Amino acid sequence: MAGLLNGWITEDPDRDRPEVATALARQWENYHRHAAQGTDAPVPPPVKPERRRARGVSAAPGHFLHATPADTADAIRTYLGDAPVETVWFFAGLGGMPEELVRRHVTTLCTELAPRLRTP
């Protein structure tokens, strides 16, 4: 099994929080606006990034994990339980993010999170 988990993994969540929250809200508000376009459905209210973050790790759109690699590895193990999952992936970046922030995120996924998930 394999699948997407929504999140931003960083060595310093507090440092990255303002930019991540802004990009997360912008991305999902664009999705919502386009999903409603051409229909009679109203555009959903603005996204509250902290509410999504509070829900923790999940593949569901309303969830978003913003945590350190160690906390993320623990959260993923708890979320997956005994499911036969071999692969999880995250988006490399959120729309409109600075390239340096995306680079740090991808580097952290590869060098910090992946090794923690390989070991029990």
Image (spheres, rainbow, N blue to C red):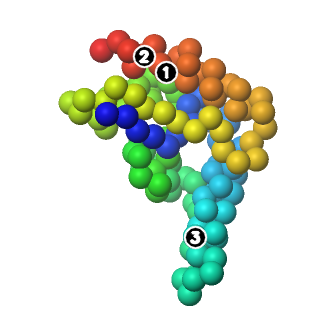
- Residue 101, compared with residue 23, is above or below; it is above
Amino acid bearing label 1: Leu
Provide the residue designation for mark 3. 35
Which element type, helix, strand or loop, lies under badge 2? helix
Q: Quadrant of residue 83?
A: top left
Amino acid bearing label 3: Ala
Q: Badge 1, how many Cα within 10 Å: few under 14, some, many 20+? A: many
Amino acid bearing label 2: Arg
Provide the residue designation for mark 2. 116
Q: Earlier in the sequence, mark 3 or mark 1?
A: 3
Front one among 33 and 63: 33
Badge number at residue 51: none
Front one among 5 and 2: 2
Dots 2, 1 in contact, CB < 8 A: yes
Q: Is residue 63 visible?
A: yes
- Residue 20, compared with residue 30, is above or below; it is above
Q: Is residue 35 left or right of residue 59?
A: right
Task: Give the mark toward the camera: 3 or 2.
Answer: 3
Q: Quadrant of residue 26?
A: bottom right
Residues under labels 3 and 2: Cα distance? Answer: 37 Å
Residue 2, position as x, y percentages in the image: 37, 34
Residues under labels 3 and 1: Cα distance? Answer: 33 Å
Q: Quadrant of residue 49?
A: bottom right
Front one among 116 and 59: 59
Q: Residue at x 78, y 38 (%)?
A: 98
Badge number at residue 113: 1
